[in-house]
Every structure is written in C-alpha cells, then in structure tokens.
Amino acid sequence: MCLLWGTTYLAIRVAIETIPPLLMAGFRWTVAGGIIVAALSIRGERIPPPVNWPAFIVLGVLLMGLGNGGVVWAEQTLPSGLTAVLVADVPFWMVGIERFMRDAEPLSVRRVVGLIIGFGGIVLLVWPELQFGNSRAFVLGVVATQLACVGWAIGSSYARRRHADENVLAAAALQMLFGGVILAVAGLTRGEWGMLALSNRSVTALVYLIIAGSIGGFSAYAYALKHLPVATVSLYAYVNPVIAVLLGTLILDEPLSPRLVVAGAIVLIGMALVRSDPKPNAKSSNTVGTEFQN
C-alpha cells in the first residue's frame, strides 16, 4: 500500500495535465470499482445487497469524494511531493477522531512520541515551501489537502467499524464505484467535459492510477483497516512523502537536498516507533487472513 500510493501523487500530477481533476478522479474510481465487481461476479462472490449500499455511498463520499478529490484538486496548484507531505497530517486526524469513538483504541506514550517525531520530519520537509507559498492558489491547495485528510480520517474510522464478516474486496469495490460516480457528476456539473483533452502521457498515468492506485492500493488499505490498529494503518501517510520526493528527484529532476534526506530519516524513525508499539490489538490478532479465504 505504501509503495503503490507513494507513486500515485506523481501519477495524479501527470494525469491532470490534460484531464480535468474531478473527471479524472471519477474515471479512475468508477472503472476500478467496476473491474473488481465484474471479477467478483465471474468468480461467484457475493456482492453486498442494495440494503447496505447507503453505507457505501457515505464511504464513497468521504474516502473518494473528499479524500481523493481534495488531493487531486490540490495538485492543480501544489507540487506532487509537497501535496504528499501535507496529506501526511492524516494520522493526526485519524488518531484524534478515534479518541471520540466509543471503542477507541488506547493511545500509548510510544505512539504519541512516534507521531510527534514523524510530524517533525514532515514540518522539516514542508517549512521552506510554506514560507514562500503565500499566494491564494497555494493557500487553497493547502486547505484542500486538509479537507482531504478530514474526509479520509472520518471515512476510515467508519469503515473500520463495519461488519467484520463483510467481503472486504466487494465492499471496497462498491465504495470506489459510488465515490467515482459522485466525483464524475461533480466534474460534469463544473463543466469539465468541455475541458477534457487526452494525451498519451495523461492516459498512461490514468491507467496506472486505476490498476496500481485503486485496484491494488485501495483494496490493500480496506483490508488493513479491518485487521490493524488505526495508528498503524495511518503510517502510510508518513511513507508517501518520502517516496514522492524521491520520485520528484529522479523523474522531474528536483534537487535532493540534505534537508530532505534528514527529514525523510526522521519520518521513518517516527513510523518505526509507532509500528513497534508492544500493545496488541485483539481484533487484528484474531481475524487476520479470514476475509480473503472465502
């Protein structure tokens, strides 16, 4: 999940070069969800009945609509690496929202320290850009990333508390479908169809987002939410900026300064502290591996 999603920021930036943002995101999630539903149907897997669809619509709005839609919108005005850095705030939103839940997981001192250290690395990454990014477009991009974090955090917390016996892949597919349709409708309402243009570069990036980012990455994320503590799952947001910055350096010839190297190391140290928390999660230890055996 971390490896796949770390590359999608660059792919989004390339895809929206010629494909309008909301319409691009709508294509991505609708096609990915449709492919998974078709594959499950061919295999004879049970798709959740329509009575459960309202919950998937809500999740589609929160995770794809706000979560991914905010990221795609932000990348119109923000570099891909910087967007990944700003979205790394999501663990704090996720842990904070979890604290208000009735069955909230215990937040140990080790996890708190790890999250703070990880966020310190994020601040070190983004601070120079924030100092010079005082334009209105920049500010709107930053706001969009934080709205994306809020939507993703609320949706993830809700998804984690859904039925334990639910087919994770089928549930993820319906979320993709409904979220993709909502994004596509928003794009059409905004008049993006008239702005649509296709290039080999953008189409290739869109295909990569569908296969790697949606079918591969989001399916893995939905599975992880069922079996791991939220604080552990949210660590992908710390790994993504490191991958995004490295890709920017290798592909877009962006400079790799000592500051970026140090910041990346700090991020990984924070991730290691949170991941090594000795407190087990009873639910995850008892249910790992059960969903995909059906």
Image (cartoon, helix red, strand yellow):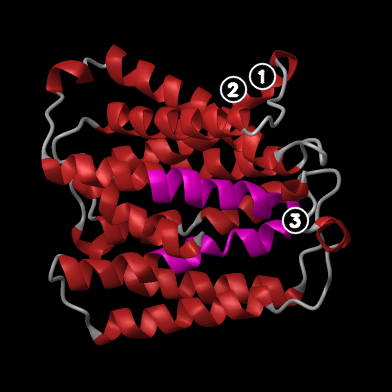
Identify residue type, mark 1: Trp
Residue corresponding to mark 2:
57
Residue corresponding to mark 1:
53
Q: Quadrant of the C terminus?
A: top right
The residue under the point 18% across, 47% down is 135
Magenta segment boundaries in residue numbering: 211-240
Locate residue 104 relative to residue 134 in the image: left or right.
right
Q: Secondary structure at mark 2?
A: helix
Q: Is residue 38 magenta?
A: no
Identify residue type, mark 2: Ile
Q: CA distance from mark 2 to mark 3?
A: 23 Å
The residue under the point 69% across, 14% down is 50
Considering only order in the chain, which callout, 1 or 3, is on the residue closer to the N terminus?
1
Q: Secondary structure at mark 3?
A: helix
Look at the picture and state if 130 lies above or below 169.
below
Residue corresponding to mark 3:
227
Between 62 and 171, the one lying in front of the other is: 171
Look at the picture and state if 258 lies above or below 115.
below
Q: Position of residue 41 (x, y in %)?
A: 61, 27
Locate residue 60 relative to residue 276 in the image: left or right.
left
Q: Residues within 10 Å of mark 2 (few under 14, many from 20)?
A: some
Magenta span main SS: helix
Q: Residues within 10 Å of mark 1 (few under 14, many from 20)?
A: some
Q: Are marks 2 and 1 in contact (CB under 8 Å)?
A: yes
